[in-house]
Image (cartoon, coloured by chain):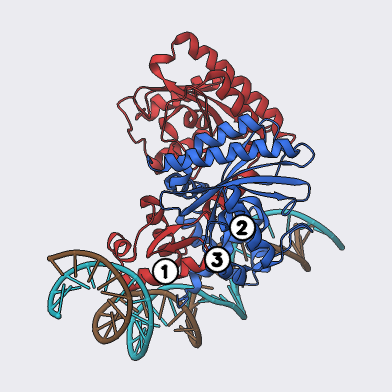
Chain colours: A blue, B red, C cyan, D brown
DNA sequence: AAAATCATTCGGGAGAGCCGAAACGCTTCT
DNA sequence: AGAAGCGTTTCGGCTCTCCCGAATGATTTT
């Protein structure tokens, strides 16, 4: 963990990040934004094109579908993804809402798969999207099944960023909730990440009780009353359970 | 197009390719396969971890969900993808088969989106998967709407690789078929890429008649007889048409 | 306990990347 | 048309970075 670095690699991926962020760009435009000399950026772009991860059409550079390919291959090998795939569809059909599978990666909560039910609100949620662990139901469900030490480390490194006025920003409150989540078997958040949205999520554990991810249903608060919440909680808990069993057969 | 290169960039992505191919790996394992010194591979992996595109757990390195993220962002910005999304679902429901949106990229045919109908056979088809343009219906639909010169260039660069004993390997036969495809408005292949599968595909053109991609339905030959083919051809043609109109409102 | 295997650190030398400057190509203005 | 403006691409000599063998440390196997 010395953080041995390689300037070229770092710069190459900074350019990729920039391309992804803005959906492509031209040489001088990127040079401007990244504060690098144009000729340098030009060189990198040439090299990136050579790799097949970037393409250029009419002086406009952009990322290629290779990222999709690498991403999907990796996802396909993720056991919890395979174990949950059918479940997500079922839940989306049953609840009509927005259903996701989320996992932890580098202290963050990442969407691995999205399944939109017929009534799903249009969230800006796509595979690969990241969010803080503490600020939403699936993240909390995941944290609830890590050791307190590990949770504390994540808090130390990432802080408890406020995303709405409902976001939990006090570590004590968070730890109390994690306890509660372990007891009731699911997590819930009310506008802690996106105002007006309620998310209900159950953790997916494997045989050795390691946390593998969380299944999450999201919908507008207006549509999801007390009774509906209990209903959805049961659904995600049942699905998480099925998934746990499936994990053995992957 | 001088092919100005950068060794570090090239090597970094070769490592990524290797990780994607084999779903991760350890330092010496990768060093072996790539024929690089272990210390060098180690350095690169450190640098890649630093960027966030690779992660390591227990000495096992693998790509992260960042690839998914970059890939999906790019896809989301692809006009033809936005224009076609609803159509794919409809076709999958209507035909029950395997439906894809494909585009051309770097002389190849790439899957951008997949929608599996209830009866879909399980193809190894995922977003980002690539295939030769000449060896399947969607590729031929795309080629049919490029200039003959451009088609010839692609043949010169890529050749007409034989994937099954049905694959078109004679340029003259290919050019004849492209003419036919333009006339009837859709392309068909019978086991030219995968034995036993028939694919029917319609090109998606924009207002200025530029080719943007192709919508494709695939199923087993046994299930898709003459009548069914005509039916599916009509469906993909209609959908391609709707998509063309949608393109203006994206 | 010894041996074998693999990951990691270190450092001096080679060569790869760097970027200013100039050339080129394309569009826009006078 | 001519000239000016703008962005891209090429070039090349200097510098700094990456390179990798060898030593060390960590783990697993015999």
Q: Nearer the viewer, mark 3 or mark 1?
A: 3
- Asked which quadrant contains residue A17, the reply is bottom right
Residue at 47 percent across and 36 percent down: it is B151
Q: How many marks?
A: 3
Q: Which mark is residue B44?
A: 1
The x, y position of residue A128, in whole percent, is 57, 51
Residue at far front of view:
A183
The x, y position of residue B72, in whole percent, is 58, 47
Q: Is residue C6 left or right of residue B130?
A: left
Q: Which mark is residue A203?
A: none
- Of helix, strand and loop, which one carries label 3? helix
Packing grade of label 2 (10 A; few <14, some 14-19, many >=20) is: many
- Measured in 3D between alpha carbons, the distance from the residue under mark 3 to the one under mark 2, in whole angstroms, is 10 Å
A100 relative to C4, above or below: above
Quarter of the image for the C terminus of chain A: give it: top left
Quarter of the image for the N terminus of chain A: give it: bottom left
Residue nearer the viewer, B68 or B149: B68
Residue assigned mark 3: A148
């Amino acid at each position: 963990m010395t953080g041995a670095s390689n300037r070229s690699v770092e710069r190459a991926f900074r350019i990729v990040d920039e391309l992804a962020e803005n959906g492509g760009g031209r040489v001088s435009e990127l040079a401007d934004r990244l504060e690098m000399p144009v000729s340098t950026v030009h060189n990198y772009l040439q090299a990136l094109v050579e790799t097949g991860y970037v393409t250029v059409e009419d002086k406009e550079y952009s990322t290629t579908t290779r990222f999709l390919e690498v991403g999907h291959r990796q996802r396909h090998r993720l056991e919890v993804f395979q174990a949950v795939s059918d479940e997500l569809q079922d839940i989306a059909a049953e609840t009509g809402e927005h259903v996701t599978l989320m996992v932890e990666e580098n202290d963050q909560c990442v969407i691995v798969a999205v399944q939109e039910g017929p009534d799903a609100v249009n969230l800006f949620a796509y595979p690969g999207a990241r969010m803080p662990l503490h600020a939403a139901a699936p993240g909390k469900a995941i944290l609830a099944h890590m050791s307190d030490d590990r949770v504390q480390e994540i808090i130390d490194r990432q802080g408890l960023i406020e995303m709405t006025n409902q976001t939990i920003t006090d570590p004590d409150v968070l730890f109390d909730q994690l306890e509660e989540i372990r007891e009731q078997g699911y997590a819930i958040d009310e506008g802690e990440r996106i105002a007006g949205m309620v998310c209900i999520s159950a953790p997916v554990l494997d045989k050795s009780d390691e946390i593998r991810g969380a299944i999450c249903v999201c919908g507008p608060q207006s549509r999801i009353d007390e009774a509906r919440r209990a209903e959805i909680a049961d659904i995600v808990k049942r699905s998480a359970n099925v998934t746990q069993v499936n994990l053995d057969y992957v």
